Amino acid sequence: MKKIILLLLLSTAIFAQQKRVETSIDTTKNKIGAEFKLTLKTSVDTLSKVVFPNLKNIGALEVIQSYPVDTVKNNDRYELIKRYGLTQFDSGRYVIPSIKVLINNKAYQTESISVEVANVKVDTLQQKMYDIKDIQPANDTIGNWWKYLLGLLVILGIGTGVYWFLKNRQKKKIEEEVYKTPIEKATSLLNNLEKKELWQKGEIKEYYSELTDIARNYIEEAIEIPAMESTTSELIEGLRAASVKKKMTVSQEIIGNLERVLKQADLVKFAKSKPLEYEITEDRNKIQKAILTLDSSIPVEVPVEEDILLNEAQRQKQIAIQLKKKKKQRIITAVATVVFLVMATTIFLMVTKGFDYVKDNIIGHPSKELLEGEWVKSEYGNPAVKIETPKVLKRTDLTKSLPKEGLALVKEMQSFAYGSLIDNFYLMVSTLKFKQETQIDLKKSMEVSLQTMESQGAQNMIVKQEDYETKEGITGLKAYGTFSRINATTNDKERIYYEVLLFSQEGGLQQILILHQEGDKYANEISERVLSSVELKQEGR
Protein backbone atom coordinates (compact mmCIF):
# COMPACT_ATOMS: atom_id res chain seq x y z
CA MET A 1 0.00 0.00 0.00
CA LYS A 2 2.87 2.38 0.77
CA LYS A 3 4.26 1.79 -2.71
CA ILE A 4 0.90 2.74 -4.22
CA ILE A 5 0.77 6.00 -2.29
CA LEU A 6 4.37 6.93 -3.04
CA LEU A 7 4.11 6.26 -6.77
CA LEU A 8 0.87 8.17 -6.91
CA LEU A 9 2.10 11.22 -5.04
CA LEU A 10 5.49 11.41 -6.72
CA SER A 11 4.50 10.33 -10.21
CA THR A 12 4.33 13.86 -11.61
CA ALA A 13 7.64 14.88 -10.12
CA ILE A 14 9.89 11.87 -10.71
CA PHE A 15 8.08 9.59 -13.21
CA ALA A 16 10.10 9.58 -16.39
CA GLN A 17 11.39 6.88 -18.72
CA GLN A 18 13.29 6.60 -21.97
CA LYS A 19 10.88 6.09 -24.87
CA ARG A 20 12.25 3.10 -26.74
CA VAL A 21 8.76 1.83 -27.65
CA GLU A 22 6.18 4.01 -29.40
CA THR A 23 2.54 3.39 -28.49
CA SER A 24 -0.53 4.22 -30.59
CA ILE A 25 -4.13 3.12 -31.05
CA ASP A 26 -6.47 3.34 -34.03
CA THR A 27 -9.29 4.99 -32.03
CA THR A 28 -9.88 6.09 -28.46
CA LYS A 29 -13.66 5.70 -28.64
CA ASN A 30 -15.53 2.60 -29.81
CA LYS A 31 -18.78 0.70 -29.36
CA ILE A 32 -19.29 -2.20 -26.97
CA GLY A 33 -17.64 -5.34 -28.37
CA ALA A 34 -15.81 -3.44 -31.14
CA GLU A 35 -12.06 -3.89 -31.65
CA PHE A 36 -9.38 -1.42 -30.54
CA LYS A 37 -6.08 -1.96 -32.39
CA LEU A 38 -3.15 -1.22 -30.08
CA THR A 39 0.16 -0.77 -31.93
CA LEU A 40 3.65 -1.03 -30.39
CA LYS A 41 6.61 0.07 -32.53
CA THR A 42 10.35 -0.03 -31.82
CA SER A 43 13.48 0.50 -33.88
CA VAL A 44 16.55 -1.65 -33.14
CA ASP A 45 19.78 -2.71 -34.81
CA THR A 46 20.18 -6.08 -36.53
CA LEU A 47 21.78 -7.70 -33.48
CA SER A 48 19.10 -6.73 -30.96
CA LYS A 49 16.57 -9.18 -29.55
CA VAL A 50 13.02 -7.91 -28.90
CA VAL A 51 10.34 -9.84 -26.96
CA PHE A 52 6.73 -8.64 -27.00
CA PRO A 53 4.50 -10.07 -24.24
CA ASN A 54 1.83 -12.69 -24.96
CA LEU A 55 -1.19 -11.44 -23.01
CA LYS A 56 -4.82 -12.55 -22.55
CA ASN A 57 -5.87 -9.27 -20.97
CA ILE A 58 -4.40 -5.78 -20.98
CA GLY A 59 -5.90 -3.99 -18.03
CA ALA A 60 -9.68 -4.37 -18.15
CA LEU A 61 -9.68 -5.03 -21.90
CA GLU A 62 -9.63 -8.52 -23.36
CA VAL A 63 -7.08 -9.45 -26.04
CA ILE A 64 -9.14 -11.02 -28.84
CA GLN A 65 -6.31 -11.09 -31.38
CA SER A 66 -2.51 -11.01 -31.07
CA TYR A 67 -1.22 -10.15 -34.56
CA PRO A 68 2.18 -11.38 -35.87
CA VAL A 69 5.11 -8.99 -35.62
CA ASP A 70 5.75 -6.99 -38.80
CA THR A 71 9.41 -6.29 -39.66
CA VAL A 72 10.49 -3.36 -41.85
CA LYS A 73 14.17 -2.96 -42.73
CA ASN A 74 15.46 0.58 -42.76
CA ASN A 75 19.18 0.67 -43.78
CA ASP A 76 21.07 -1.09 -40.98
CA ARG A 77 18.13 -1.10 -38.56
CA TYR A 78 14.86 -2.98 -38.17
CA GLU A 79 11.52 -1.46 -37.32
CA LEU A 80 9.36 -4.01 -35.43
CA ILE A 81 5.61 -3.48 -35.25
CA LYS A 82 3.33 -5.50 -32.91
CA ARG A 83 -0.46 -5.13 -32.88
CA TYR A 84 -3.04 -6.31 -30.34
CA GLY A 85 -6.80 -6.48 -30.93
CA LEU A 86 -8.64 -5.42 -27.74
CA THR A 87 -12.31 -5.25 -26.77
CA GLN A 88 -14.62 -4.63 -23.79
CA PHE A 89 -18.28 -5.57 -23.32
CA ASP A 90 -19.12 -3.02 -20.63
CA SER A 91 -19.49 0.67 -21.37
CA GLY A 92 -17.26 3.13 -19.57
CA ARG A 93 -13.89 4.85 -19.60
CA TYR A 94 -10.89 2.52 -19.36
CA VAL A 95 -7.12 2.86 -19.14
CA ILE A 96 -4.88 0.63 -21.23
CA PRO A 97 -1.91 0.34 -18.84
CA SER A 98 1.72 0.32 -19.87
CA ILE A 99 3.13 -2.97 -21.18
CA LYS A 100 6.62 -4.31 -20.53
CA VAL A 101 8.67 -4.98 -23.70
CA LEU A 102 12.09 -6.64 -23.42
CA ILE A 103 14.86 -5.28 -25.62
CA ASN A 104 18.14 -7.16 -25.10
CA ASN A 105 16.74 -8.43 -21.76
CA LYS A 106 16.10 -4.87 -20.56
CA ALA A 107 12.50 -3.89 -19.77
CA TYR A 108 10.93 -0.84 -21.42
CA GLN A 109 7.41 0.38 -20.58
CA THR A 110 4.92 1.53 -23.19
CA GLU A 111 2.71 4.56 -22.62
CA SER A 112 -0.75 4.13 -21.10
CA ILE A 113 -3.76 5.23 -23.16
CA SER A 114 -7.29 6.14 -22.10
CA VAL A 115 -10.15 4.76 -24.21
CA GLU A 116 -13.93 5.00 -24.01
CA VAL A 117 -16.44 2.23 -24.69
CA ALA A 118 -19.88 3.59 -25.63
CA ASN A 119 -23.29 1.91 -25.64
CA VAL A 120 -24.73 0.85 -29.01
CA LYS A 121 -27.32 3.35 -30.15
CA VAL A 122 -30.70 1.99 -31.21
CA ASP A 123 -31.84 2.97 -34.71
CA THR A 124 -35.38 4.16 -34.11
CA LEU A 125 -36.00 4.73 -37.85
CA GLN A 126 -35.26 1.23 -39.11
CA GLN A 127 -36.07 -0.77 -35.96
CA LYS A 128 -39.77 -1.36 -35.33
CA MET A 129 -40.84 0.07 -31.97
CA TYR A 130 -43.59 -1.10 -29.63
CA ASP A 131 -45.68 0.63 -26.99
CA ILE A 132 -44.57 0.35 -23.41
CA LYS A 133 -46.76 -2.09 -21.53
CA ASP A 134 -48.35 -1.16 -18.23
CA ILE A 135 -46.74 -2.41 -15.06
CA GLN A 136 -48.14 -5.80 -14.17
CA PRO A 137 -48.49 -6.58 -10.44
CA ALA A 138 -46.34 -9.49 -9.35
CA ASN A 139 -48.16 -12.34 -7.66
CA ASP A 140 -45.74 -12.88 -4.81
CA THR A 141 -48.10 -15.29 -3.06
CA ILE A 142 -47.81 -17.89 -5.81
CA GLY A 143 -44.06 -17.62 -6.05
CA ASN A 144 -43.33 -17.52 -2.34
CA TRP A 145 -45.97 -19.80 -0.83
CA TRP A 146 -43.39 -22.52 -0.26
CA LYS A 147 -41.31 -20.16 1.90
CA TYR A 148 -44.19 -19.57 4.29
CA LEU A 149 -45.03 -23.28 4.33
CA LEU A 150 -41.40 -24.16 5.02
CA GLY A 151 -41.21 -21.60 7.82
CA LEU A 152 -44.45 -22.91 9.36
CA LEU A 153 -43.23 -26.52 9.21
CA VAL A 154 -39.89 -25.62 10.78
CA ILE A 155 -41.61 -23.70 13.60
CA LEU A 156 -44.03 -26.61 14.18
CA GLY A 157 -41.08 -29.02 14.19
CA ILE A 158 -39.20 -26.98 16.76
CA GLY A 159 -42.35 -26.62 18.85
CA THR A 160 -42.96 -30.38 18.75
CA GLY A 161 -39.38 -31.04 19.78
CA VAL A 162 -39.64 -28.66 22.72
CA TYR A 163 -43.00 -30.24 23.74
CA TRP A 164 -41.61 -33.77 23.75
CA PHE A 165 -38.51 -32.58 25.55
CA LEU A 166 -40.57 -30.99 28.32
CA LYS A 167 -42.88 -34.01 28.43
CA ASN A 168 -39.98 -36.42 28.81
CA ARG A 169 -38.51 -34.19 31.51
CA GLN A 170 -41.84 -34.32 33.34
CA LYS A 171 -41.99 -38.09 32.95
CA LYS A 172 -38.47 -38.43 34.28
CA LYS A 173 -39.38 -36.10 37.13
CA ILE A 174 -42.29 -38.36 38.11
CA GLU A 175 -40.14 -41.46 37.87
CA GLU A 176 -37.38 -39.91 39.97
CA GLU A 177 -39.75 -38.53 42.61
CA VAL A 178 -38.64 -39.45 46.11
CA TYR A 179 -41.17 -41.57 48.04
CA LYS A 180 -41.19 -42.09 51.78
CA THR A 181 -41.56 -45.89 51.54
CA PRO A 182 -41.17 -48.56 48.81
CA ILE A 183 -44.87 -49.47 49.04
CA GLU A 184 -45.85 -45.82 48.43
CA LYS A 185 -43.65 -45.74 45.35
CA ALA A 186 -45.00 -49.04 43.99
CA THR A 187 -48.63 -48.02 44.51
CA SER A 188 -48.08 -44.64 42.79
CA LEU A 189 -46.33 -46.24 39.81
CA LEU A 190 -49.13 -48.80 39.42
CA ASN A 191 -51.69 -46.00 39.30
CA ASN A 192 -49.64 -44.09 36.71
CA LEU A 193 -49.31 -47.26 34.65
CA GLU A 194 -53.07 -47.64 34.47
CA LYS A 195 -53.47 -44.02 33.39
CA LYS A 196 -51.24 -44.65 30.36
CA GLU A 197 -53.68 -47.30 29.03
CA LEU A 198 -50.85 -49.13 27.28
CA TRP A 199 -52.52 -52.49 26.79
CA GLN A 200 -55.73 -50.82 25.60
CA LYS A 201 -53.61 -49.24 22.84
CA GLY A 202 -52.15 -52.61 21.89
CA GLU A 203 -48.81 -52.03 23.64
CA ILE A 204 -49.06 -55.24 25.68
CA LYS A 205 -45.33 -55.95 25.77
CA GLU A 206 -44.57 -52.47 27.15
CA TYR A 207 -47.37 -52.86 29.72
CA TYR A 208 -46.07 -56.17 31.12
CA SER A 209 -42.50 -54.85 31.13
CA GLU A 210 -43.43 -51.86 33.32
CA LEU A 211 -45.75 -53.97 35.50
CA THR A 212 -43.09 -56.54 36.39
CA ASP A 213 -40.41 -53.83 36.80
CA ILE A 214 -42.59 -52.19 39.48
CA ALA A 215 -42.86 -55.53 41.36
CA ARG A 216 -39.14 -56.29 41.02
CA ASN A 217 -38.16 -52.76 42.18
CA TYR A 218 -40.39 -53.08 45.23
CA ILE A 219 -38.98 -56.49 46.18
CA GLU A 220 -35.41 -55.25 45.76
CA GLU A 221 -35.94 -52.13 47.88
CA ALA A 222 -38.25 -53.55 50.56
CA ILE A 223 -37.00 -57.14 50.98
CA GLU A 224 -33.39 -56.38 49.88
CA ILE A 225 -32.78 -59.13 47.33
CA PRO A 226 -31.33 -58.55 43.80
CA ALA A 227 -34.65 -58.78 41.98
CA MET A 228 -33.83 -56.65 38.88
CA GLU A 229 -30.88 -58.79 37.77
CA SER A 230 -32.48 -62.18 38.62
CA THR A 231 -34.46 -64.50 36.39
CA THR A 232 -38.01 -65.38 37.37
CA SER A 233 -36.90 -68.67 38.97
CA GLU A 234 -34.03 -67.02 40.84
CA LEU A 235 -36.35 -64.25 42.08
CA ILE A 236 -39.00 -66.67 43.45
CA GLU A 237 -36.35 -68.84 45.09
CA GLY A 238 -34.74 -65.79 46.70
CA LEU A 239 -38.12 -64.50 47.85
CA ARG A 240 -38.95 -67.80 49.59
CA ALA A 241 -35.57 -67.81 51.31
CA ALA A 242 -35.96 -64.20 52.44
CA SER A 243 -39.46 -64.81 53.81
CA VAL A 244 -38.07 -67.58 56.04
CA LYS A 245 -35.04 -65.54 57.10
CA LYS A 246 -37.05 -62.42 57.88
CA LYS A 247 -39.90 -64.45 59.45
CA MET A 248 -42.44 -63.05 57.01
CA THR A 249 -46.02 -64.37 57.30
CA VAL A 250 -46.68 -64.74 53.56
CA SER A 251 -48.64 -67.63 52.04
CA GLN A 252 -47.32 -69.81 49.24
CA GLU A 253 -50.42 -68.84 47.23
CA ILE A 254 -49.27 -65.22 47.00
CA ILE A 255 -45.75 -66.28 45.95
CA GLY A 256 -47.26 -68.69 43.39
CA ASN A 257 -49.50 -65.99 41.89
CA LEU A 258 -46.48 -63.66 41.62
CA GLU A 259 -44.49 -66.42 39.88
CA ARG A 260 -47.29 -67.04 37.35
CA VAL A 261 -47.52 -63.34 36.46
CA LEU A 262 -43.75 -63.08 36.01
CA LYS A 263 -43.73 -66.14 33.74
CA GLN A 264 -46.67 -64.70 31.79
CA ALA A 265 -44.65 -61.52 31.31
CA ASP A 266 -41.67 -63.55 30.05
CA LEU A 267 -43.91 -65.19 27.45
CA VAL A 268 -45.26 -61.81 26.33
CA LYS A 269 -41.80 -60.24 26.05
CA PHE A 270 -39.88 -63.15 24.51
CA ALA A 271 -42.46 -65.48 22.93
CA LYS A 272 -44.84 -62.76 21.67
CA SER A 273 -47.73 -64.22 23.64
CA LYS A 274 -50.96 -62.17 23.71
CA PRO A 275 -53.06 -62.63 26.86
CA LEU A 276 -56.77 -61.90 26.82
CA GLU A 277 -58.14 -58.72 28.36
CA TYR A 278 -59.47 -60.40 31.50
CA GLU A 279 -56.09 -62.15 31.97
CA ILE A 280 -54.29 -58.82 31.81
CA THR A 281 -56.62 -57.36 34.42
CA GLU A 282 -56.17 -60.39 36.68
CA ASP A 283 -52.37 -60.22 36.36
CA ARG A 284 -52.40 -56.57 37.35
CA ASN A 285 -54.56 -57.33 40.41
CA LYS A 286 -52.32 -60.26 41.38
CA ILE A 287 -49.22 -58.03 41.27
CA GLN A 288 -50.90 -55.34 43.37
CA LYS A 289 -52.16 -57.94 45.92
CA ALA A 290 -48.73 -59.62 46.08
CA ILE A 291 -47.00 -56.28 46.75
CA LEU A 292 -49.50 -55.29 49.45
CA THR A 293 -49.32 -58.75 51.09
CA LEU A 294 -45.53 -58.80 51.05
CA ASP A 295 -45.40 -55.32 52.55
CA SER A 296 -47.82 -56.20 55.36
CA SER A 297 -45.92 -59.42 56.14
CA ILE A 298 -42.57 -57.69 56.71
CA PRO A 299 -41.92 -57.53 60.49
CA VAL A 300 -42.01 -53.98 61.82
CA GLU A 301 -38.91 -53.04 63.79
CA VAL A 302 -39.23 -50.41 66.48
CA PRO A 303 -36.71 -47.72 65.60
CA VAL A 304 -34.32 -46.52 68.24
CA GLU A 305 -33.51 -42.86 68.72
CA GLU A 306 -30.35 -43.05 66.60
CA ASP A 307 -32.29 -44.58 63.70
CA ILE A 308 -34.91 -41.84 63.98
CA LEU A 309 -32.24 -39.14 63.81
CA LEU A 310 -30.53 -40.91 60.89
CA ASN A 311 -33.80 -41.24 58.98
CA GLU A 312 -34.59 -37.57 59.57
CA ALA A 313 -31.15 -36.56 58.27
CA GLN A 314 -31.64 -38.72 55.18
CA ARG A 315 -35.09 -37.21 54.66
CA GLN A 316 -33.71 -33.67 54.85
CA LYS A 317 -30.98 -34.64 52.42
CA GLN A 318 -33.54 -36.08 50.01
CA ILE A 319 -35.60 -32.88 50.25
CA ALA A 320 -32.52 -30.77 49.43
CA ILE A 321 -31.69 -33.00 46.45
CA GLN A 322 -35.30 -32.77 45.24
CA LEU A 323 -35.32 -28.97 45.49
CA LYS A 324 -32.05 -28.78 43.57
CA LYS A 325 -33.47 -31.00 40.82
CA LYS A 326 -36.62 -28.88 40.56
CA LYS A 327 -34.53 -25.71 40.27
CA LYS A 328 -32.40 -27.30 37.55
CA GLN A 329 -35.53 -28.42 35.70
CA ARG A 330 -36.98 -24.91 35.84
CA ILE A 331 -33.74 -23.49 34.40
CA ILE A 332 -33.69 -26.07 31.60
CA THR A 333 -37.34 -25.37 30.79
CA ALA A 334 -36.73 -21.61 30.69
CA VAL A 335 -33.64 -21.99 28.46
CA ALA A 336 -35.51 -24.35 26.10
CA THR A 337 -38.38 -21.86 25.85
CA VAL A 338 -36.05 -18.94 25.10
CA VAL A 339 -34.15 -20.97 22.47
CA PHE A 340 -37.43 -21.94 20.83
CA LEU A 341 -38.65 -18.33 20.73
CA VAL A 342 -35.33 -17.06 19.32
CA MET A 343 -35.22 -19.76 16.64
CA ALA A 344 -38.88 -19.30 15.73
CA THR A 345 -38.44 -15.52 15.45
CA THR A 346 -35.26 -15.92 13.39
CA ILE A 347 -36.89 -18.37 10.97
CA PHE A 348 -39.96 -16.14 10.64
CA LEU A 349 -37.78 -13.13 9.78
CA MET A 350 -35.73 -15.19 7.31
CA VAL A 351 -38.90 -16.31 5.51
CA THR A 352 -40.59 -12.90 5.47
CA LYS A 353 -37.61 -10.52 5.14
CA GLY A 354 -34.82 -12.73 3.80
CA PHE A 355 -31.54 -14.16 5.06
CA ASP A 356 -29.60 -10.92 4.48
CA TYR A 357 -31.90 -9.02 6.83
CA VAL A 358 -31.36 -11.59 9.60
CA LYS A 359 -27.61 -11.72 8.97
CA ASP A 360 -27.20 -7.94 9.02
CA ASN A 361 -29.55 -7.08 11.90
CA ILE A 362 -29.32 -10.11 14.22
CA ILE A 363 -25.99 -11.80 13.51
CA GLY A 364 -24.32 -8.46 12.72
CA HIS A 365 -22.49 -6.84 9.79
CA PRO A 366 -19.16 -4.96 10.21
CA SER A 367 -19.94 -2.31 7.59
CA LYS A 368 -23.44 -1.74 9.01
CA GLU A 369 -22.02 -1.24 12.49
CA LEU A 370 -19.46 1.17 11.03
CA LEU A 371 -22.16 3.12 9.19
CA GLU A 372 -24.45 3.40 12.23
CA GLY A 373 -21.66 4.36 14.65
CA GLU A 374 -20.69 7.84 15.80
CA TRP A 375 -18.99 9.72 12.94
CA VAL A 376 -16.13 12.21 13.29
CA LYS A 377 -15.40 15.31 11.19
CA SER A 378 -11.80 16.53 11.15
CA GLU A 379 -9.03 18.09 9.04
CA TYR A 380 -6.10 16.04 7.76
CA GLY A 381 -2.79 17.00 6.13
CA ASN A 382 -1.49 20.13 4.39
CA PRO A 383 -3.08 21.42 2.14
CA ALA A 384 -5.91 20.49 4.53
CA VAL A 385 -8.63 18.03 3.65
CA LYS A 386 -11.72 18.35 5.83
CA ILE A 387 -13.72 15.13 5.81
CA GLU A 388 -16.31 13.20 7.84
CA THR A 389 -15.42 9.57 8.60
CA PRO A 390 -16.96 6.75 10.68
CA LYS A 391 -13.74 6.49 12.71
CA VAL A 392 -10.82 8.80 13.42
CA LEU A 393 -8.08 8.28 10.82
CA LYS A 394 -4.70 7.33 12.25
CA ARG A 395 -1.46 8.85 11.02
CA THR A 396 0.81 6.59 8.98
CA ASP A 397 4.52 7.26 8.34
CA LEU A 398 5.64 6.86 4.73
CA THR A 399 8.92 8.76 4.78
CA LYS A 400 10.99 5.67 5.64
CA SER A 401 9.90 3.98 2.40
CA LEU A 402 10.40 7.09 0.23
CA PRO A 403 13.30 6.96 -2.28
CA LYS A 404 16.07 9.47 -1.62
CA GLU A 405 15.58 11.18 -4.97
CA GLY A 406 11.87 11.53 -4.21
CA LEU A 407 12.42 12.69 -0.64
CA ALA A 408 14.64 15.51 -1.91
CA LEU A 409 11.68 16.97 -3.83
CA VAL A 410 9.15 16.72 -0.99
CA LYS A 411 8.63 19.53 1.48
CA GLU A 412 5.86 17.90 3.50
CA MET A 413 3.96 14.62 3.26
CA GLN A 414 1.20 13.34 5.52
CA SER A 415 -1.01 10.27 5.35
CA PHE A 416 -3.96 9.12 7.49
CA ALA A 417 -5.88 5.85 7.20
CA TYR A 418 -8.50 3.57 8.72
CA GLY A 419 -8.34 -0.22 8.34
CA SER A 420 -6.11 -2.19 6.00
CA LEU A 421 -6.30 -3.64 2.52
CA ILE A 422 -7.67 -6.96 3.81
CA ASP A 423 -10.46 -5.36 5.90
CA ASN A 424 -14.09 -4.96 4.79
CA PHE A 425 -13.55 -1.22 4.46
CA TYR A 426 -10.39 0.84 3.88
CA LEU A 427 -10.13 4.63 3.80
CA MET A 428 -7.01 6.77 3.27
CA VAL A 429 -6.43 10.53 3.06
CA SER A 430 -2.98 11.75 2.03
CA THR A 431 -1.45 15.11 1.14
CA LEU A 432 1.88 16.09 -0.38
CA LYS A 433 3.62 19.43 -0.84
CA PHE A 434 6.71 19.95 -2.98
CA LYS A 435 9.62 22.23 -2.16
CA GLN A 436 9.32 23.93 -5.53
CA GLU A 437 6.15 24.82 -7.38
CA THR A 438 5.30 21.90 -9.65
CA GLN A 439 2.70 21.59 -12.37
CA ILE A 440 0.76 18.45 -11.47
CA ASP A 441 -0.96 16.41 -14.18
CA LEU A 442 -3.90 14.71 -12.40
CA LYS A 443 -4.64 12.35 -15.30
CA LYS A 444 -1.04 11.14 -15.43
CA SER A 445 -0.99 10.71 -11.65
CA MET A 446 -4.24 8.73 -11.79
CA GLU A 447 -2.89 6.43 -14.51
CA VAL A 448 0.24 5.70 -12.51
CA SER A 449 -1.87 5.00 -9.43
CA LEU A 450 -4.05 2.49 -11.28
CA GLN A 451 -1.02 0.81 -12.86
CA THR A 452 0.61 0.48 -9.46
CA MET A 453 -2.56 -1.06 -8.01
CA GLU A 454 -2.38 -3.67 -10.76
CA SER A 455 1.25 -4.39 -9.92
CA GLN A 456 0.18 -4.92 -6.29
CA GLY A 457 -2.29 -7.70 -7.18
CA ALA A 458 -5.32 -5.99 -8.71
CA GLN A 459 -6.59 -8.05 -11.66
CA ASN A 460 -9.21 -7.47 -14.38
CA MET A 461 -9.51 -3.82 -13.37
CA ILE A 462 -12.46 -1.84 -14.70
CA VAL A 463 -11.76 1.90 -14.71
CA LYS A 464 -14.17 4.77 -15.11
CA GLN A 465 -13.01 8.38 -14.84
CA GLU A 466 -14.83 11.67 -14.55
CA ASP A 467 -14.23 15.21 -13.42
CA TYR A 468 -15.15 15.90 -9.81
CA GLU A 469 -16.21 19.12 -8.13
CA THR A 470 -16.58 19.80 -4.41
CA LYS A 471 -19.35 21.89 -2.88
CA GLU A 472 -16.92 24.85 -2.80
CA GLY A 473 -16.33 24.58 -6.56
CA ILE A 474 -12.84 23.04 -6.42
CA THR A 475 -12.33 20.66 -9.36
CA GLY A 476 -10.42 17.41 -9.32
CA LEU A 477 -10.36 13.98 -10.92
CA LYS A 478 -12.26 10.89 -9.84
CA ALA A 479 -11.57 7.28 -10.84
CA TYR A 480 -13.79 4.39 -9.78
CA GLY A 481 -14.57 0.82 -10.72
CA THR A 482 -13.79 -2.72 -9.61
CA PHE A 483 -10.93 -5.21 -9.68
CA SER A 484 -10.31 -8.79 -8.59
CA ARG A 485 -7.80 -9.85 -5.96
CA ILE A 486 -6.89 -12.93 -3.93
CA ASN A 487 -7.96 -12.76 -0.29
CA ALA A 488 -4.82 -13.34 1.78
CA THR A 489 -6.83 -15.06 4.54
CA THR A 490 -9.09 -17.43 2.55
CA ASN A 491 -7.12 -17.59 -0.75
CA ASP A 492 -10.45 -17.01 -2.54
CA LYS A 493 -10.86 -14.53 -5.37
CA GLU A 494 -12.97 -11.52 -4.40
CA ARG A 495 -14.20 -8.46 -6.23
CA ILE A 496 -13.22 -5.07 -4.80
CA TYR A 497 -14.84 -1.70 -5.49
CA TYR A 498 -12.59 1.37 -5.36
CA GLU A 499 -12.88 5.14 -5.58
CA VAL A 500 -9.96 7.58 -5.90
CA LEU A 501 -10.20 11.39 -5.71
CA LEU A 502 -7.25 13.61 -6.68
CA PHE A 503 -6.95 17.39 -6.20
CA SER A 504 -4.09 19.80 -6.90
CA GLN A 505 -4.08 22.72 -4.45
CA GLU A 506 -1.45 25.19 -3.21
CA GLY A 507 1.37 23.46 -5.05
CA GLY A 508 0.49 20.12 -3.50
CA LEU A 509 -1.47 16.99 -4.16
CA GLN A 510 -4.47 15.76 -2.16
CA GLN A 511 -5.78 12.22 -2.42
CA ILE A 512 -8.73 10.25 -1.00
CA LEU A 513 -8.81 6.49 -1.54
CA ILE A 514 -11.67 4.11 -0.59
CA LEU A 515 -11.68 0.32 -1.01
CA HIS A 516 -14.37 -2.20 -0.01
CA GLN A 517 -15.96 -5.43 -1.20
CA GLU A 518 -18.23 -5.11 -4.20
CA GLY A 519 -21.93 -5.42 -3.39
CA ASP A 520 -21.59 -4.24 0.22
CA LYS A 521 -24.55 -1.83 0.37
CA TYR A 522 -23.53 -0.45 3.76
CA ALA A 523 -19.99 0.27 2.53
CA ASN A 524 -21.51 2.05 -0.50
CA GLU A 525 -23.47 4.30 1.86
CA ILE A 526 -20.30 4.99 3.85
CA SER A 527 -18.45 5.96 0.64
CA GLU A 528 -21.22 8.31 -0.47
CA ARG A 529 -21.35 10.01 2.92
CA VAL A 530 -17.54 10.33 3.13
CA LEU A 531 -17.12 11.79 -0.37
CA SER A 532 -20.08 14.16 -0.02
CA SER A 533 -18.45 15.64 3.10
CA VAL A 534 -15.11 16.51 1.45
CA GLU A 535 -14.06 20.15 1.90
CA LEU A 536 -10.77 21.55 0.57
CA LYS A 537 -9.03 24.76 1.47
CA GLN A 538 -8.98 26.98 -1.60
CA GLU A 539 -5.84 28.77 -2.68
CA GLY A 540 -5.49 32.26 -1.33
CA ARG A 541 -8.07 31.75 1.43
Image (cartoon, grey):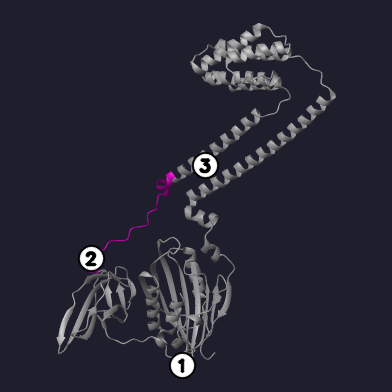
Residue visible at 48% across and 15% down in the picture: 271
Pointer 1: residues within 10 angstroms few (<14), some, or many (20+)?
A: few
Residue extending furthest right? 305
**Residues at badges 2 and 3 in contact (C-beta under 8 Å)?**
no
Q: Main secondary structure of the magenta part?
A: loop
Task: Give the SS element for disc 2.
Answer: loop
Horizontal relation, residue 317 to residue 279: left or right: right
On whether residue 83 falls in the magenta region, the answer is no
Horizontal relation, residue 83 to residue 265: left or right: left
Residue 383 visible to the viewer: yes
Q: Nearer the viewer, residue 121 or 347?
A: 347
Q: Earlier in the sequence, mark 3 or mark 1?
A: 3
Please state, as top left, top right, bottom left or bottom right, where the C terminus lies in the image. Answer: bottom right
Mark 1 vs mark 2, foreground winner is: 1
- Using the image, determine if residue 370 lies above or below residue 470: above
**Residues at badges 3 and 1 in contact (C-beta under 8 Å)?**
no
The residues tagged by marks 1 and 2 sit, at their Cα atoms, a distance apart of 57 Å
Mark 3 vs mark 1, foreground winner is: 1
Residue segment shown in magenta: 123-146
Residue 471 visible to the viewer: no
Q: Which residue is mark 2?
A: 127
Q: Which residue is mark 1?
A: 437
- Using the image, determine if residue 483 lies above or below residue 134: below
Task: Give the SS element for disc 3.
Answer: helix
Residue 155 circle label: 3
Residue 107 percent across, percent down from the top left:
30, 80
